[in-house]
């Protein structure tokens, strides 16, 4: 931050304290434009907090507030910078002069399918999401990803029918859809990702024989006797059993 | 990295660090253990439930006279948004009709919808936010199911009953523990990618209160993986499952026999009340951490405000365990991006030292 900007920010802080507006001590303020409205907000705010601090209520655009759910995809520009930036409102901090807008929803046509009739290969990708073959490998999706995933690479995996790699590279996708909105080829990357993961889980997993056995044991009512006995115990007897239980 | 106002605190932490490290290395206790009186003193001063206002007597409804968590009491005693007189016309002409109304679109709601269509029932999910906007999405470490030969569903039962101080409803704990292994397989068949060992068996770890290793996982994203899989499956049945997002139910409707016959939804976009007539209604709305009990930060989702509890109470349901809140002892308050984020107990197990404001 240049000296001039610093002074300007100090003046703003003063203005705030003069009006007696409650604020934590020593918080520095920045001006941001929230969906077109200028607002003075603490400089250590996330975009999400800044929106709420400014008095706006978030209906669309907030979910887990911890970077898991992808509800709060946001685009913004910064002063003197021609680029469009992308981020999650819950994990991106505001900056002086930021102009931002939340994305209330991502319009798209999800492929509707019956997982039981699919094969984990390129034929499925071709049938359900032929649009992936329009990829021009420009990397815009990768630049847009707030999770820092190699989005373009997993689309390339999908084009090759490499479902395991598609799953691996897209594992941490939060489904915000910012990639899909930025893609010049109009691919819906995050939906291709969930298809890839489901194909992997259903068809390319290693089978657990232990799990087969356990499910059979339950179906054969092998635990009915133990359950009946445990459920018949009074509080004291149950407590005794609990504190004497064997551990692994 | 840290803002100016934390400078003094950091200084204090630094001042005591070498001494604490020395003590930790020498295997001597870093802090002298508290005696019972000291413990009681700290708990009574600082534990969120110890404040006299933490619980209050509820004055109306099926739990009348019981002491409930104050934030819950306040909601249960509040007036309805609805004026019944103004609803008469739409009650006579419902906006939606469905076999099964599912209130809440999280893990339980989506699972209920998928189960319903397998049984030839066409459900409708009404949810306050988006489908999948739920605490289920945020689970990180894993979930419990007795899947190994060393373990058994009945061992899981005993662990869970003990963890609940023997207050749990036995038949619910049996369902939870006995159905666990089958649910693991059903989720796998829907495409959930469990962490596996070389031979294909499920990777399991210990969780809080477990006597045997039974925490199955999807790296650190179990909730997100399960939730996205379930959402995708719900969206694969657009002709059978109707999904209404940003349309929370606000009141249940009862028929002339006093049985639940649907609900009134509130459309957050148009601010209209919408009447649903349903043959059966399922409430899958989750918990209430977002009420910020005693003003604390929360690990819960934006939407976790106990809506279903309030609706059910107003319709005459008796609520259980409303005097209990689960507080996690450690969490983040700075930086802002992770405020309310859970700090796992593993941190202390690995030697992390909690310090107070004096370092």
Image (cartoon, coloured by chain):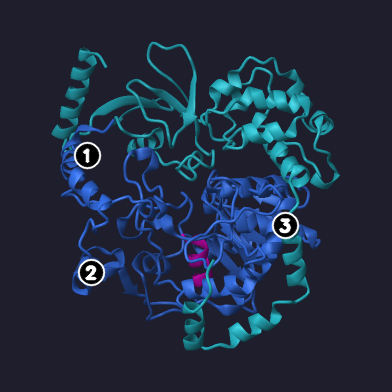
State the extent of the magenta-drawn residues as a range. B306-317
Q: Chain of mark 1?
A: A
Hue used for the chain lettered A: cyan
Q: Which mark is residue B185?
A: 3
- Residue A196 percent location from the top left of the image: 72, 36
Query: Mark 2 and mark 3: span between their CA atoms?
Result: 45 Å
Check disc 3: other Cα within 10 Å, few if <14, some if 14-19, many if 20+. some
Rendered residue at 75%/71% (across/down): A217
Q: Which mark is residue A23?
A: 1
| Residue B309 forms part of the magenta stretch | yes
Q: Chain of mark 3?
A: B
Query: Mark 1 and mark 3: span between their CA atoms?
Result: 52 Å
Query: Mark 1 and mark 2: span between their CA atoms?
Result: 34 Å
Rendered residue at 48%/29% (across/down): A87
Check disc 2: other Cα within 10 Å, few if <14, some if 14-19, many if 20+. few
Q: Is residue B241 visible from the viewing direction of this image?
A: no
Chain shown in blue: B
Q: For this rendering, which residue is in front, B43 or B248? A: B43
Left or right of residue B46: residue B151: right
């Amino acid at each position: 931050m240049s000296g001039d900007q610093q002074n300007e920010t100090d003046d703003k802080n003063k203005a705030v304290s003069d009006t007696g507006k409650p604020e934590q001590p020593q918080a520095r303020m920045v001006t941001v434009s929230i969906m077109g409205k200028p607002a003075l907000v603490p400089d250590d705010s996330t975009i999400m907090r800044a929106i709420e601090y400014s008095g706006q209520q978030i209906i669309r655009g907030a979910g887990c507030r911890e970077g898991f759910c992808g509800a709060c995809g946001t685009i913004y520009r910064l002063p003197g910078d021609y680029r469009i930036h992308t981020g999650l409102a819950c994990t991106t901090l505001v900056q002086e002069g930021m102009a931002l807008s939340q994305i209330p929803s991502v319009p798209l046509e999800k492929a509707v399918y019956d997982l039981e009739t699919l094969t984990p290969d390129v034929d499925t990708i071709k049938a359900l999401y032929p649009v992936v073959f329009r990829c021009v490998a420009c990397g815009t999706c990768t630049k847009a990803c707030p999770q820092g995933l190699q989005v373009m690479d997993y689309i390339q995996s999908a084009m090759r029918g490499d479902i395991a790699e598609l799953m691996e590279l897209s594992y941490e996708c939060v489904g915000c859809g910012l990639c899909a909105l930025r893609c010049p080829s109009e691919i819906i990357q995050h939906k291709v990702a969930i298809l890839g993961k489901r194909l992997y889980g259903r068809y390319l997993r290693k089978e657990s024989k232990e799990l087969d056995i356990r499910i059979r044991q339950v179906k054969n009512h092998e635990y009915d006797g133990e359950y009946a006995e445990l459920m018949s115990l009074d509080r004291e007897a149950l407590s005794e059993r609990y504190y004497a239980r064997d551990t692994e | 990295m840290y803002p100016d106002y934390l400078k003094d605190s950091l200084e204090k932490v630094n001042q005591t660090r070498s001494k604490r490290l020395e003590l930790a290395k020498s295997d001597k206790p870093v802090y002298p253990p508290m005696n019972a009186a000291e413990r009681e003193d700290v708990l009574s001063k600082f534990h969120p439930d110890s404040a006299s206002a933490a619980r209050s007597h509820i004055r109306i409804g099926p739990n009348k006279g019981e002491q409930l968590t104050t934030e819950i009491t306040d909601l249960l005693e509040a007036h309805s948004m609805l004026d019944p007189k103004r609803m008469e016309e739409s009650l006579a002409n419902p906006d939606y009709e469905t076999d099964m109304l599912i209130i809440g679109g999280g893990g339980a709601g989506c699972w209920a919808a998928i189960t319903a269509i397998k049984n030839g029932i066409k459900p409708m999910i009404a949810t306050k936010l988006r489908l999948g906007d739920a605490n289920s999405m945020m689970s990180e470490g894993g979930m419990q199911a007795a899947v190994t030969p060393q373990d058994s569903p009945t061992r899981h039962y005993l662990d869970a009953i003990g963890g609940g101080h023997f207050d749990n409803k036995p038949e619910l704990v049996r369902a939870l523990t006995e159905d666990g292994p089958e649910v693991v397989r059903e989720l796998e068949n829907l495409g959930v990618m469990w962490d596996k060992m070389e031979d294909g068996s499920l990777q399991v770890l210990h969780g809080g209160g477990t006597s045997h290793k039974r925490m199955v996982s999807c790296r650190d994203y179990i909730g997100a993986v399960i939730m996205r899989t379930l959402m995708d499956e719900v969206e694969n049945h657009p002709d059978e499952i109707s999904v209404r997002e940003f349309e929370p139910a606000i009141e249940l409707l009862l028929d002339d026999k006093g049985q639940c016959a649907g609900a009134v939804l509130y459309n957050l976009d148009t601010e209209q009340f919408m009447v649903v007539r349903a043959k059966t209604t399922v409430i899958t709305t989750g918990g209430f951490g977002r009420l910020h009990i005693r003003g604390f930060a929360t690990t819960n989702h934006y939407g976790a405000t106990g809506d279903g509890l309030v609706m059910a109470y107003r319709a005459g349901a008796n609520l259980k365990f409303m005097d209990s809140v689960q507080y996690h002892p450690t969490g983040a308050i700075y930086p802002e991006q992770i405020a309310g984020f859970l700090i796992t107990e593993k941190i202390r197990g690995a030697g992390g030292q909690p310090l107070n404001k004096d370092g």
